[in-house]
Image (cartoon, rainbow, N blue to C red):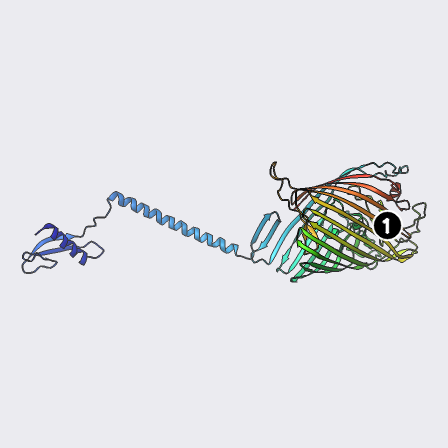
Amino acid sequence: MKISILNAAIAGLLLAGASAQALALELYVNTETQQIFAQPGPGRTRLGTFKQVDETAPPPVQAAEIASQKAEIEKIKDDLSLKNIELKALTEQVKDPALGKTRVDEQGVRWESADGNFTVKLNGRVQLDAQVNTDQSGVAAAKPGAFSNDLANGTSIRRARLSAEGNMFKTYGYKFEYDFTRGNGSTAGGVTDAFMTWNGYAPLTLTAGQFKEPISIEEATSDIQTSFIERNMAVNAFIDNNNVFKMGLGGKFAQPRWTAQTAIQTESMGNGAPTTDTSSTNGNGNANRNGGSGDTGWGLTGRLTGLPWFQDKSHLLHVGAAGSQRYINVNPDTLPCNPTSSNNNCFSANGNGARFGSAIDSNVDRSLLLDTGFISKANGSISTQTVTRLGGEFAAVHGPFSVQGEYLQAQVSGNGLNNNNLNGYYAFASWFLTGESRNYNEKVGIFDRIKPAANFTTLGRGLGAWEFLAGYDYLDLNSGAIHGGRASTSKFGLNWYPTSRIRVMTNFIHVLELDTLNSASAQARAFNGTHPDIFEMRTQLDF
């Protein structure tokens, strides 16, 4: 018997009859046939007891290492299981509608619920202004004991606003904005926007609350996007300085090539404007109607815009028209009228009704050198009943070049008045030296935020955007019994946009004509026939 044959036979029998566990077997061999048996029998000789041996089993030291590794692997599995449970819990929290997304980027600070039904966005702006006046030669000296007639040099915070806006259930919107530089602390004049909207039908938006009158492209364009530091004189006199934010209901229908807006509005929530048309006689303005204020004034306003030529957002022609009819609640002074000038101009200085006025494109010293006073007399011989405003606008953009202009007029009617026509217009051209283009928003028919091609952050990394401006501005507030004065100016500007949220502006204003001979204001009369120069600067940040 060869040992190799015996070993092979034993191994085959063990593999055939043994289980996964090691077994002890008694083996027998037939001496004649050399067959191996597991049971005794005739002619069989016992070989002995045999056990299956695992030749691959590791030595005792390796076995200990393997056991340690297995224990470590089991611990890692347990840790991963716990991490998976924690991750699953975090995922469920993110999906919770009570929690949402927070985003902070160039668009501002925003929150949005996980289901998209609710959004909140914080906005703010600060405008730091400075003004230096030169060549005030010829301005008449003030009377002894009176303040100087000269325009003052100085600095101021023009606007400092915070607002929150967003959506509820996707189709309802809201906005609330407060300006810390408006009002006098005892009125609601600091509130600008305070409204809600409904957007349930895509082209149509309905608005209720206090919001801007839909009139004029320059007024509709936000003050953080207007080209010059101050809006032009006609826009200020007929719209902005009367507090353009008024209570009411409005609607807007927007299509890709045209928009239509209308609103029926009463008066502003508070005073907060240099020539406010709020008729309430109490300190809270239109926030209350007590104190014998009478009924509120109201008006209907509308604006239509279109794009007769539109290649893209940097090659277009914009045209528009606007109209407004306002009914004025007049509360003339109850005291006898006292003359305020040699021509016996007896208009009320502190009464109510219509009043139109504007500074000469200035922003720190905003003296109303053009000012009609309240167009009402204490004896009622002159009182304003209606004001009809009409306007036409245009703008064209061709790459870095653009032009914009408007004509506005206000027809004043009432006792002692017969459609007295006050009017003004402006035009200006803009050129981006760094190649950008004015950003037109076709959904509203206005100009929007400028984005530099390369932000200025550190030296050698972009120049920002540079814009040069030149324009002409004219306003005439003289008509019949109304002597508000007449003026025209040439104006130049250089704007620098380091980023889309920061702007540095410099304006130079030269007065071409100033006719204030018959003005009710002594300071305005002192400037009659003069040609002052005004330098203005602004540093602006918004988010």
Q: Quadrant of residue 412?
A: bottom right
Q: Check disc 1 and report its element: helix, strand or loop.
A: strand
Residue plotted at (37% across, 48% down) = 75
Q: Quadrant of residue 213?
A: bottom right
Q: Quadrant of residue 13?
A: bottom left
Residue plotted at (82% across, 42% down) = 511
Number of numbered labels in the structure image: 1
Please name the amino acid that badge 1 sits on: Leu
Residue 109 image offset from top left, x and y in percent:
61, 49
Residue that carries the numbered disc 1 in the rendered image: 477
Query: What is the crowding at mark 1: few (fewer than 14 residues within 10 Å), some, or many (at least 20)?
Result: many
In this image, 17 relative to 1: left or right?
A: right
Which of the two residues, 314 or 55, is positioned nearer the viewer here?
Answer: 314
In this image, 431 relative to 149: left or right?
A: left
Which of the two residues, 270 or 346, is positioned nearer the viewer here?
Answer: 346
Residue 431 image offset from top left, x and y in percent:
70, 44
Residue plotted at (85% across, 43% down) = 513
Residue extending farthest bottom:
201
Q: Is residue 449 visible?
A: yes
In this image, 335 relative to 504: left or right?
A: right
